[in-house]
Image (cartoon, rainbow, N blue to C red):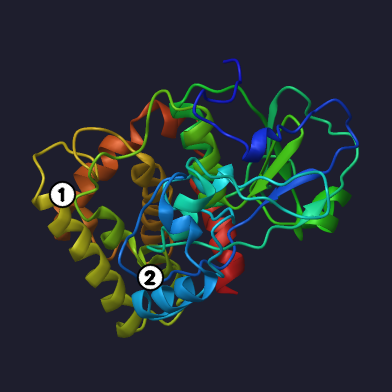
């Protein structure tokens, strides 16, 4: 599949980065702290007379409209609007950074509802080994060569498979990480290198893939509350699998999360995925976690809780997703999962 920037992708003031030199700084993508302001949504246009109002009046208006002022509102500033995917925040090769806005600077400056701020670093990496293609660096298994048990990397691979994208895999052990990954990205994996850019953390990577490779779309039209159901789900799974004492607390916490999952599926037609009839990013996210749970229950918990009996809709959902081609193409052996959790349990 060829790569090109979407027609609606806009750079600030026409400053389009040039990729003529492999020594140009790489762009770093990370999940950084998100600061949200609570305010009444306001909007204007570049021709709005509001842009000529004295600055002190804007300060008063901002102070009354929001409970917490997290950004400095200046009529000509470029703010990061919530309707722009986080991967669209780009940096100039200069020492200062620019935010991308799909609307005028005055509009985004005044759109105080849910403004996000991010501090992204600019780094140099030298020539990239993946010019023109994609390479996914991910946790290696015990042998240091085959794919490891990371559910977050599995999430990324399912998205890549669903979109039919070509990519190379680089299973990497802790002592085998390339120097650039250690020096500039703190050794974080999964890490996706595409052309001359690198992205770390699964949530950022899948956002990037969904925006720049929109077909087929994996963004749910309506998640029907699925995102809330998944909140805290994997931490509950992890605590349950790491608990060598099989305490009531961790078991009951997991059952509570599974019951919420079951109740959510019960509200949807039979055979539905998390957000309805279409397979989405949320499914790609949770299916690897459910795989770990199933393997861990069988390997460490003597089959308890019995998912098929206690949570039949969840179990049916798992079987449907496990049979999906994207899962089958990215699966790793149960022994690898048990090896990974065995290290966490010791």
Determine the image quadrant of residue 319. Answer: top left
Residue 110 visible to the viewer? yes
Determine the image quadrant of residue 300. Answer: bottom left
Residue at horizontal 61 percent and vertical 66 percent from the top: 343
Residue at horizontal 87 percent and vertical 47 percent from the top: 124
Q: Locate the N terminus and report the quarter of the image it occupies.
A: top right
| Relative image position of residue 148 (x, y in whole percent) | 62, 47
Give the residue pinned by disc 1. Answer: 313
Does residue 45 appear left or right of residue 339 in this picture? Answer: left
Does residue 218 appear left or right of residue 169 in this picture? Answer: left
Residue 236: mark: 2
- In this rendered view, identify the residue nearer to me: 33 or 41: 41
Does residue 255 appear left or right of residue 38 in this picture? Answer: left
Q: Is residue 68 above or below residue 187?
A: below
Between the C-alphas of marks 2 and 1, the distance is 19 Å
Residues at circles 2 and 1 in contact by the CB criterion of under 8 Å = no
Residue 143 visible to the viewer? no
| Relative image position of residue 317 (x, y in whole percent) | 23, 43
């Amino acid at each position: 599949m060829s790569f090109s920037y979407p027609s609606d992708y806009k750079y600030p003031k026409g400053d389009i980065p040039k990729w003529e030199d492999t020594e140009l700084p790489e762009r770093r993508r990370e999940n950084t702290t998100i600061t949200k302001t609570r305010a009444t949504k306001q909007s204007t246009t570049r021709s709005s007379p509001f842009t000529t109002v004295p600055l002190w009046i804007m300060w008063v208006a901002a102070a009354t409209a929001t409970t917490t002022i997290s950004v400095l509102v200046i009529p000509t500033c470029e703010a990061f609007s919530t309707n722009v995917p986080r991967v669209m925040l780009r940096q100039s090769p200069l020492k200062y950074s620019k935010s991308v806005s799909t609307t005028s600077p005055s509009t985004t400056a005044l759109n105080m509802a849910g403004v996000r701020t991010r501090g992204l670093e600019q780094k140099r990496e030298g020539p990239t080994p993946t010019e023109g293609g994609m390479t996914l660096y991910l946790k290696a298994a015990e042998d240091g060569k085959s794919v490891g048990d990371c559910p977050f990397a599995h999430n990324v691979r399912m998205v890549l498979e669903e979109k039919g994208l070509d990519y190379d895999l680089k299973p990497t052990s802790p002592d085998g990480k390339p120097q650039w990954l250690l020096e500039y990205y703190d050794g974080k994996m999964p890490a996706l290198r595409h052309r001359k850019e690198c992205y770390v953390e699964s949530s950022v990577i899948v956002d990037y893939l969904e925006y720049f490779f929109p077909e087929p779309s994996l963004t749910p039209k309506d998640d029907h509350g699925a995102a809330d159901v998944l909140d805290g789900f994997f931490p509950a799974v992890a605590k349950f699998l790491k608990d060598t004492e099989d305490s009531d607390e961790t078991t009951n916490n997991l059952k509570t999360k599974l019951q919420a999952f079951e109740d959510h599926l019960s509200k949807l037609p039979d055979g539905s995925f998390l957000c309805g009839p279409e397979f989405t990013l949320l499914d790609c996210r949770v299916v690897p976690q459910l795989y770990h749970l199933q393997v861990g229950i069988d390997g460490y918990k003597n089959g308890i809780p019995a998912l098929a009996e206690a949570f039949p809709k969840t179990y049916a959902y798992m079987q449907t997703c496990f049979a999906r081609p994207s899962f089958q193409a990215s699966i790793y052996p149960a022994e690898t999962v048990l090896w990974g959790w065995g290290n966490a349990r010791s």
